[in-house]
Every structure is written in C-alpha cells, then in structure tokens.
Image: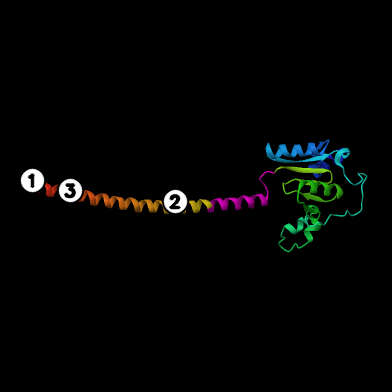
Amino acid sequence: MNGEYESVVDEFLRDELNFIVVKSWDSAHEGVRLLKTGVDGRATFLVHPEDSQAKFSFAGDDSVPHHNTAQTIVPLRNCIRVLDGFGRSLEAILPKLREGYVAPDSETARSLALENPSAFFLAPTGECFHNVTVTGGRPGAEGPLALKREVRETQQKLGEIERELGQAEMRAATLAKTLADLTRTLDARSEERRVTCLLYTSRCV
C-alpha cells in the first residue's frame, strides 16, 4: 500500500480490510455460528474464490447485473419508510438500500449473491451475503435503530409490570376485604362468647 495514502485508504476500507478469509462456505458458516452462540459481535467472512462457486468473473465486469425478481425476494427499499422528503433519493445515496434484498433463507441468499455480485441479500436469520462474503453474528446494541428497539422493549416491559402491579393491587384489595370480614366475624363471635359467659355467671350466682 502506498504510504502516502495508507491512513486514508485504511479508514475508507476499514471493514473490507477486516474480512476473515476462509477456505470454504462451511468454514464461513461455522464462524457465523460461533459468533451467534459465543461472544457478541459481527464479522464478515471472505470465501476464497476457489471454493466460492461464484457465477461471475473475478476480472471485473462493468455491466449491470440481473437480479432475481421472484416473489420470494423482497427489495430492501420496500421494507422501510423514508421520511423528511427524501423519497427515492436515498436509493442513490445508499448502495445497500438500492441493491439490498431479503431472501427467504440462507441458501437462496448465498446463491443469489454469487449470481449478482453487486447486490446484498439478507437471510431471515440475520446473515448478509454479498458477492463471495457472508456477514453474521450478534451486533452490538448501538445506533438509533437499536435504541428505538430498546425503548420499545422497555415500554413493553413497563406495560407488563403495570398490568401485574394492577392485578397485585386488586388481589391486595380483595385480601384486605376478606381480612376485614374475618376480623368482624371474629369480633362478633368473641362478643357472643362474652355475653354467653356473663349470662352463665349470672345464673350461677
């Protein structure tokens, strides 16, 4: 790498330079599995061309790729709502939005990624397939979307706690009423016994 531009290129290609090169898709899937079940974090695994089974030339191709438009493939732009007057302009700004698709399963996502090297295909299990790479793992809780999810989950938990608290207050009120009734009954019976004892004592005298 040219030393003059090393820092600039390193920053721009930060994610790409941190790819983990593996020999096969099996190794990539195993890496994703470990990230999901072991530690938090995500990583991108680059499958070596010899095993990638890519259906395109690595020499480069400037032609526009053809995307599978089967009904089971959902464009990512159809899954979000753009506000603040952006309209469809974000598709030109964000390549992942323009070229992103949701596939029905991991196998379909991988197959389509190999056929369409410029597109991004997301699997329902969270992996992202792009060209001969797959990114997966457990992302850290950061960013506005993560915060929105955290707020939504907190609100749901708060609602559940409030419902449980309301039910507990109702049970407490019922128990308090039952206790009051039992106390009155006990007092009444104690008074009856006292009166009975007084009558019995009077007769004995």
Main SS, magenta residues: helix
Q: Which residues are magenta?
A: 139-159
Left/right of residue 63 with respect to residue 40 in the rendered view: right
Compare residues 36 and 103 and report the one nearer the observer: 103
Please give the residue where the numbered disc 3 appears in the rendered image. Answer: 194
Task: Reply yes or no: does residue 129 show up in magenta.
Answer: no
Where residue 13 sits, quadrant-wise, is top right
Q: Amino acid at mark 1?
A: Cys
x and y percent of residue 180 in the render?
31, 52
Please give the residue where the numbered disc 2 appears in the rendered image. Answer: 168
At label 1, counting other C-alpha atoms closer than 10 Å, the crowd grade (few under 14, some 14-19, many 20 or more) is few
x and y percent of residue 195 in the render?
16, 50
Q: CA distance from mark 3 to mark 1?
A: 15 Å
Asked which secondary structure carries label 2, the reply is helix
- 196 w.r.t. 86: above or below: above
The residue that appears at 71% across and 38% down in the rendered structure is: 35
Q: CA distance from mark 1 to mark 2?
A: 53 Å
Q: Amino acid at mark 2?
A: Ala
Task: Reply yes or no: does residue 157 show up in magenta.
Answer: yes
Please give the residue where the numbered disc 1 appears in the rendered image. Answer: 204
Which residue is at the far left? 205
